[in-house]
């Protein structure tokens, strides 16, 4: 980039860097003079002029040597006048290839102005365009508008700016590159641009052109649709830095903020399902320009259509419900694609589908329910467990004799004392049972089942024995709450109801309705709860899902529902046995749902094999092609202590390409012993499985994830004018429409920048001093040899 600049230097001051006292310095120079006179006091048969020349050379040499010892310095003032720069950034990401359907007069006028068409007024635009001009507008992309604006329409404006500013043109996607440093963008340069960049980072482009060292920046001009798809964690810092440095950004939005399009904004779907389950999906659709028209909403399971229905568009946001049956019977992850039928004239079809992953469980859950009080919660829960085809339920009634167990196949008399029988259960529900009912060996097997075998324990508190009778038992250590053994149950006001914590609101267990407000209203109807056990609070490692609505009147929130990990398993405490009040006017809709989701949450890890000593995980279930997949391995030894080693090897298996394997070495995380992590960069889309090496497979789980080729540039088609306005506002610039581009010079400071710099320069350690000394000494030595002087 060429830049016009001038500079002027002026000597401002001379001084000694290492001076002595003035008398001493005078004495030093006087001694040099006297010594030189003394050396040549006699004629030695020399001519007067040669004698004078040699004496002067010796004097000059000695003076230079003495002066160098005092280090003479000079202060030089340099005044530089330089031209300001004006980088013009052109967005060349894929979203700039979008052709916006322009029907309104104002939108037609904007495009016609950018394309350098003759437009008398925006109101009459539809009457003043011929068929050729209409066709040009209808086929022009956002990038076409930008390049034509710069190379034709705005050329006079840019030439005016180029007389006082150093104008340059840059293309940017995720990174920026120089196109031209000419005053105007030529047609050839414009034609060389293609909207092919896979990501957009306005922040990175701004940082690049303003820190290149090209000179003081008068401002930055950005022509873009404002869609940021590149990741940048320093966006705010970059904008604040530009504002502090006085560099305004002038943004020019290209495209329509609400083009005619249909898109899927989001979906709500459970992450786990059993084989044969019917899974409900709530789809949020956004549409414009297709009101009263219909399209087919479909669900694809592993590329097979498993459900569809017709949707009528209302315009704007709308919610549609659809369900599908999981007809996959292999345990693992399955690919779900939700898609809406596309119209021929849509801006983009990339946003008409959403990919998700669902984990399929094909094993029944073995539940052991131990109860000593035939209360209402027990009766309803027993019915739920018995009619759910996914559950094998076994019951122990501690308050009746052994006759029930002898006469019923679904009852047993006591907790199994055989390890094989005891360890078959995935979940033990402990109701209102006296701790004295269990032997020490039974408590030991129960603790081992949860701690080492990955099963779960759920205590449903009761007024007679649970949890107060379990003081000094293994169950007390397993529970996520602290309790008062001698305490009395607390009476609760009729107006008090369960209130979800932040963790509870995001938990599947407590989600009875997808809408948060509706979900809160459902839980508020679970009152009165009558009385509650004397709980002192949650343990330090516990997660509280629900507290009481009167928590503001308490010293700390009452842990109505809480859970924690215990070894490889989970333990949960539900303090109330009034969940059956959720049945009020709704039947078992919510009561069944909360228990179903609770059982799923408590048993999923064990069913998926995640209780094993080596637990493999990924940070997400689905990735976009081009992103790195983060892999984790939690490695424990035979005693379930962390394994420490330099690396841990795993395999990533492509399930779509003949089970091809990629070996990945995971590195230890120093902050968490036993945790290893690493990255996998997929080259193709599809389904992948993370597994251990052959030696570790028996003690390790496997986990599956998906890589999808989703183009974020074409997912959101709306021009983000608000984002461009914000960039301009934070940096002190302006957001200009295409018609306002001609006013750009009035906002830019075009005056040159004058800077004065004072520098200290040494006068004694330059090469010319050494050359002068050598030259003078050489001349004197030659002459003394010629005349045979001592």
Image: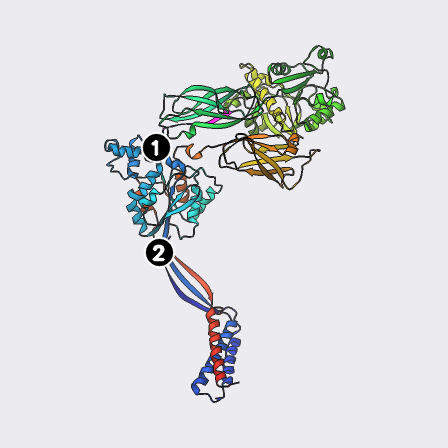
Q: Main secondary structure of the magenta part?
A: strand
In the image, is residue 230 above or below residue 286?
Answer: below
Q: Residues within 10 Å of mark 1 (few under 14, many from 20)?
A: many
Colouring scheme applied when the structure was drawn? rainbow
Q: Which residue is labeled 2 in the image? A: 4
How far from the left and from the top, in percent, is residue 712? 44, 34
In the shown orientation, is residue 117 left or right of residue 606? left
Observer-nearest residue: 66 or 417? 417
> Residue at horizontal 68%, vertical 17%?
371
Residue 175 is drawn in which quadrant?
A: top left
Q: Position of residue 736 (x, y in %)?
A: 34, 40
Q: Which image quarter: residue 83? A: bottom left
Is residue 491 covered in magenta? Answer: no
Q: Which residues are magenta?
A: 257-269
The disc, 2 or 1, on the residue closer to the chain's N-terminal end is 2
Provide the residue designation for mark 1.
100
| Residue 549 in view (yes/no) | no
Outermost residue toward the right? Answer: 440
The picture places residue 731, in percent across and down from the top left corner, at: 41, 44
């Amino acid at each position: 980039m060429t830049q016009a600049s001038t500079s002027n230097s002026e000597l401002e001051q001379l001084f000694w860097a290492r001076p002595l006292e003035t008398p001493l310095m005078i004495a030093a120079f006087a001694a040099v003079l006297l010594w030189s006179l003394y050396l040549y006091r006699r004629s030695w048969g020399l001519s007067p002029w040669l004698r004078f020349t040699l004496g002067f050379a010796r004097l000059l040499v000695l003076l230079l040597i003495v002066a160098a010892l005092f280090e003479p310095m000079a202060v030089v003032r340099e005044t530089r006048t330089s031209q300001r720069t004006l980088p013009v950034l052109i967005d060349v990401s894929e979203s700039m290839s979008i052709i916006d359907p322009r029907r309104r007069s104002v939108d037609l006028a904007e495009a016609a102005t950018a394309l350098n068409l003759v437009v008398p007024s925006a109101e009459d635009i539809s009457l003043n365009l011929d068929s050729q001009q209409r066709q040009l507008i209808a086929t022009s992309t956002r990038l076409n508008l930008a390049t034509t604006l710069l190379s034709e329409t705005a050329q006079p404006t840019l030439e005016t700016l180029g007389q006082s500013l150093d104008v340059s043109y840059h293309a940017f996607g995720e990174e920026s590159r120089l196109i031209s440093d000419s005053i105007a963008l030529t047609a050839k340069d414009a034609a060389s641009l293609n909207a092919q960049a896979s990501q957009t980072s306005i922040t990175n482009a701004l940082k690049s052109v303003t820190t290149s060292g090209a000179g003081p920046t008068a401002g930055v001009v950005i022509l873009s649709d404002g869609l940021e798809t590149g990741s940048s964690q320093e966006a705010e810092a970059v904008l604040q830095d530009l504002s502090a440095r006085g560099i305004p950004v002038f943004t020019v939005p290209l495209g329509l903020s609400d083009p005619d399009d249909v898109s899927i904004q989001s979906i709500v779907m459970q992450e786990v399902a059993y084989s044969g389950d019917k899974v409900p999906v709530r789809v949020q659709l956004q549409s414009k320009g297709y009101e009263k028209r219909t399209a087919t909403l479909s669900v694809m399971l592993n590329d097979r259509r498993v459900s569809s229905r017709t949707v009528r568009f209302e315009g704007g946001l709308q919610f549609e419900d659809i369900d599908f049956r999981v007809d996959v019977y292999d345990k693992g992850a399955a690919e779900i694609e939700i898609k809406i039928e596309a119209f021929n004239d849509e801006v983009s079809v990339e946003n008409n589908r959403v990919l998700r992953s669902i984990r399929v469980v094909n094993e029944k859950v073995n539940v052991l329910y131990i109860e000593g009080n035939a209360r209402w919660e027990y009766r309803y829960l027993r019915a739920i467990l018995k009619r759910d085809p996914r559950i094998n339920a076994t019951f122990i009634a501690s308050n009746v004799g052994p006759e029930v167990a002898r006469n019923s196949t679904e009852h047993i008399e006591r907790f199994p004392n055989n390890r094989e029988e005891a360890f078959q259960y995935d979940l033990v529900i402990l109701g209102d049972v006296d701790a004295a009912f269990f032997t020490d060996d039974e408590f030991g097997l129960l603790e081992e089942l949860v701690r080492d075998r990955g099963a779960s324990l759920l205590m449903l508190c009761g007024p007679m024995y649970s949890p107060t009778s379990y003081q000094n038992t293994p169950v007390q250590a397993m529970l996520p709450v602290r309790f008062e053994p001698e305490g009395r149950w607390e009476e609760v006001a009729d107006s008090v109801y369960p209130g979800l914590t932040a963790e509870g609101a995001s938990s599947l267990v407590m989600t009875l309705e997808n809408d948060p407000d509706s979900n809160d209203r459902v839980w508020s109807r679970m009152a009165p709860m009558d009385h509650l056990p004397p709980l002192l609070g949650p343990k330090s490692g516990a997660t509280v899902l629900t507290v009481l609505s009167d928590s503001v009147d308490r010293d700390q929130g009452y842990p109505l529902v809480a859970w924690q990990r215990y070894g490889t398993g989970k333990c949960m405490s539900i303090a109330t046995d009034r969940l059956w009040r959720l049945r009020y006017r709704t039947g078992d809709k919510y009561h069944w749902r909360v228990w179903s989701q609770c059982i799923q949450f408590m048993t999923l890890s064990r069913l998926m094999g995640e209780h094993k000593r080596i637990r493999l995980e990924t940070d997400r279930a689905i990735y976009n092609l081009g992103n790195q997949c983060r892999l984790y391995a939690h490695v424990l030894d035979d005693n379930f202590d962390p394994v420490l080693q330099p690396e841990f090897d795993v395999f990533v298996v492509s399930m779509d390409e003949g089970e091809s394997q990629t070996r990945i070495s995971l590195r230890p995380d120093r902050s968490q012993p036993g945790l290893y992590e690493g990255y996998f960069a997929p080259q193709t889309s599809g389904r992948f499985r993370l597994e251990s090496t052959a030696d570790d497979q028996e003690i390790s789980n496997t986990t599956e994830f998906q890589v999808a080729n989703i183009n974020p540039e074409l997912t959101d088609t709306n021009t983000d004018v608000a984002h461009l306005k914000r960039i301009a506002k934070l940096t002190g610039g302006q957001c200009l429409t295409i018609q306002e581009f001609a006013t750009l010079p009035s906002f830019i400071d075009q005056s040159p920048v004058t800077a004065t710099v004072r520098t200290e320069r040494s006068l004694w350690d330059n090469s010319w001093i050494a050359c002068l000394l050598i030259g003078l000494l050489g001349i004197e030595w030659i002459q003394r040899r010629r005349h045979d002087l001592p």
